[in-house]
Image: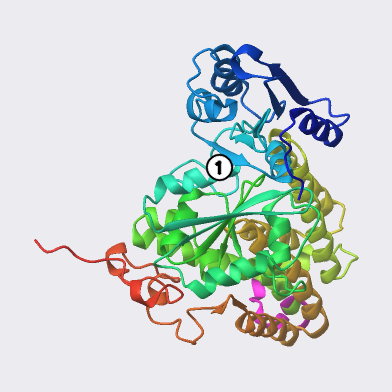
């Protein structure tokens, strides 16, 4: 712990040693009138150019302190600055040099005063960030259009804007020895279970790493099993979804430099939900959820099911369709499984290329590339038209899954089911799907079964009201089972 000296020259030497060869560090010493303040009165201002608000520093710090010194009413320079001239309310007094340096690195301004063993740290952060825009990954027809951005304080403000309750608590900290990435744990003090909040704290403090640049890196560190492919956290860029999770008793973790927040606990049910489900009429929301669950099955199982039926169980195919498939394959030289793998890898390649290219060009490459390459492959006799249809339907179904991390897992498992179906037919397909279901049933997210409310453990009952069928809002009286039992009721009909 490095202390601050009362001799301002020693403090200047320490700062210059730490910030040597920094071209963007701004350090200015201002000498004041000796007749007013005694021997060698001076102040020393330090901040990083580009991380702070210049107008705030000039108008509320430097000008009052250096120009209005004649209006002194105390004999001590430090007390005069604190009580009279410091025209900003957001400041702290620090006696530790290390804390002062960390504050400067975060974008604050440090002021050293001759004759004082403390420094004034003024909150002057002004990071270069993009504005609040509509979410590009979680769009919707109804509801608010704002989304989180990379500014930590902006993201917390978007949540505070929606929940105006003193029970909404925010615990802040830093991750990364070198990056010092700020994070915040949001939870409703009276609704969230204390054990859940404590588990989140423990998972964050479990490892020490040099740098964390995104919530995805922190999420990997916070997971219990590194080999688990299914996400146990729900990531979102929408503040309304994060606020809805908080009032249900879940915990939201916000990270600086990341436009996504993570929510715990997460279940398959929550990963299939969207914000639109609660803004639309309940029959529309129910139908949309049914489509998503069917799409998930298509995304993971349709290619494998096609291979199993066409290779081992042709008697299950209607005669006319079987003749059409046989006619389409009459000029081909590859087996069905090779056809499917070629087209699946081709679509994954197009998907990856579309992500890396600029948005306007990426959409064009995805559509035009798929049409041209698919048609050319059919004409060249590499794949059949039926395989193109199956693979295209699988790709479309994968986009219907709301959570990208969840959908990516299905994209990987799709190849496992293709291989097992090619080896053992329908038996291999069913065994692979059963193993997948058994694995999902064995998972939990902070004590909450991953497949609730389908599984037991006390998470059934009320959970079915917000499952595949989403009942009307006025029928959703209680919160989920992971919330505080004393605050389980969330809807009460007023008496007339």
Q: Quadrant of the C terminus?
A: bottom left
Q: Which of the 4 quarters of the picture holds residue 130?
A: top right
Magenta segment main secondary structure: helix
Helix, strand or loop at label 1? It is: helix
Give the quarter of the image for residue 360.
Answer: top right
Residue 357 lies left or right of residue 488; in this view the side is right
Does the magenta portion include 219?
A: no
Towards the viewer: 431 or 376: 431
Q: Nearer the viewer, residue 423 or 404?
A: 404
Residue 250 vs residue 61: left or right? left
Residue 390 seen by the camera = no
Residue at 63% x, 84% y: name it: 442
Identity of the residue drawn at 62% across and 46% down: 259
- Provide the residue span drawn in magenta: 309-320
**Which residue sits furthest right?**
333
Kindly identify the residue that appears in the image at 80 percent across and 32 percent down. 10
Find residue 398 and report its horizontal and vertical position in percent. 64, 60
Name the image quarter holding residue 364. Answer: top right
Q: Which residue is mark 1?
A: 153
Q: Callout 1: few (<14), some (14-19), or many (20+) C-alpha neighbours within 10 Å?
A: some
Q: Residue furthest left?
A: 496
Residue 427 coordinates in the image, percent (x, y): 73, 87
Left of 165 or right of it: where is 11?
A: right
391 and 53: which is toward the camera: 53
Q: Position of residue 8 (x, y in %)?
A: 74, 29
């Amino acid at each position: 712990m490095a202390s601050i000296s009362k001799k301002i020259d020693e403090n200047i030497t320490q700062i210059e040693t730490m910030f040597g060869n920094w071209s963007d560090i701004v350090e200015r010493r201002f000498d004041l009138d000796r007749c007013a303040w005694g021997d060698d009165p001076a102040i020393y201002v330090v901040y990083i150019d580009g991380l702070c608000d210049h107008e705030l520093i000039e108008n509320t710090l430097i000008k009052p302190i250096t120009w209005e010194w004649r209006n002194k009413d105390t004999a001590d320079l430090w007390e005069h600055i604190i009580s009279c001239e410091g025209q900003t309310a957001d400041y702290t007094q620090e006696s530790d040099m290390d804390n002062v340096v960390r504050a400067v690195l975060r974008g604050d301004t440090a002021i050293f005063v001759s004759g004082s063993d403390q420094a004034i740290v003024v909150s002057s952060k002004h990071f270069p960030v993009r504005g609040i825009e509509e979410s590009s990954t979680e769009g919707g027809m109804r509801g608010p259009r704002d989304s989180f951005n990379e500014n930590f304080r902006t993201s917390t403000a978007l949540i505070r804007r929606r929940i105006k309750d003193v029970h909404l608590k925010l615990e802040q900290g830093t991750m990364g020895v070198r990056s010092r990435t700020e994070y915040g744990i949001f939870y409703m003090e009276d609704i969230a279970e204390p054990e859940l909040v404590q588990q989140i704290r423990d998972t964050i403090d479990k490892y020490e790493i040099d740098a964390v640049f995104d919530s995805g890196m922190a999420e990997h560190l916070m997971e219990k099993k590194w080999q688990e492919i299914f996400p146990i956290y729900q990531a979102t860029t929408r503040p309304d979804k994060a606020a809805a999770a908080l009032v249900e008793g879940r915990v939201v973790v916000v990270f600086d430099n990341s436009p996504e927040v993570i929510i715990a606990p997460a279940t398959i049910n929550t990963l299939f939900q969207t914000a639109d489900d609660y803004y639309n009429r309940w029959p529309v929301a129910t139908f949309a959820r049914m489509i998503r669950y069917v799409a998930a099955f298509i995304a993971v199982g349709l290619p494998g099911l096609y291979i199993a039926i066409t290779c081992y169980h042709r008697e299950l195919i209607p005669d006319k369709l079987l003749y059409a498939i046989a006619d389409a394959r009459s000029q081909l030289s590859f087996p069905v499984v090779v056809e499917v793998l070629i087209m699946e890898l081709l679509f994954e390649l197009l998907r990856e290329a579309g992500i890396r290219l600029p948005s306007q060009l990426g959409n064009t490459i995805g559509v035009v590339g798929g049409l041209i390459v698919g048609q050319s492959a059919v004409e060249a006799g590499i794949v059949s038209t039926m395989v193109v249809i199956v693979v295209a339907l699988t790709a479309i179904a994968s986009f219907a899954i709301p959570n990208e991390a969840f959908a990516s897992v299905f994209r990987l498992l799709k190849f496992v089911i293709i291989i097992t179906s090619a080896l053992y037919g329908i038996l291999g397909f069913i065994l692979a799907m059963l193993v997948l279901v058994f694995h999902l049933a064995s998972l939990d997210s902070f004590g909450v079964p991953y497949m609730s409310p389908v599984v037991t453990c006390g998470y059934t009952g009320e959970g079915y009201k917000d499952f595949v069928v989403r009942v009307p809002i006025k029928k959703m009286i209680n919160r989920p089972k992971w919330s505080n039992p004393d605050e389980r009721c969330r809807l009460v009909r007023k008496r007339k």
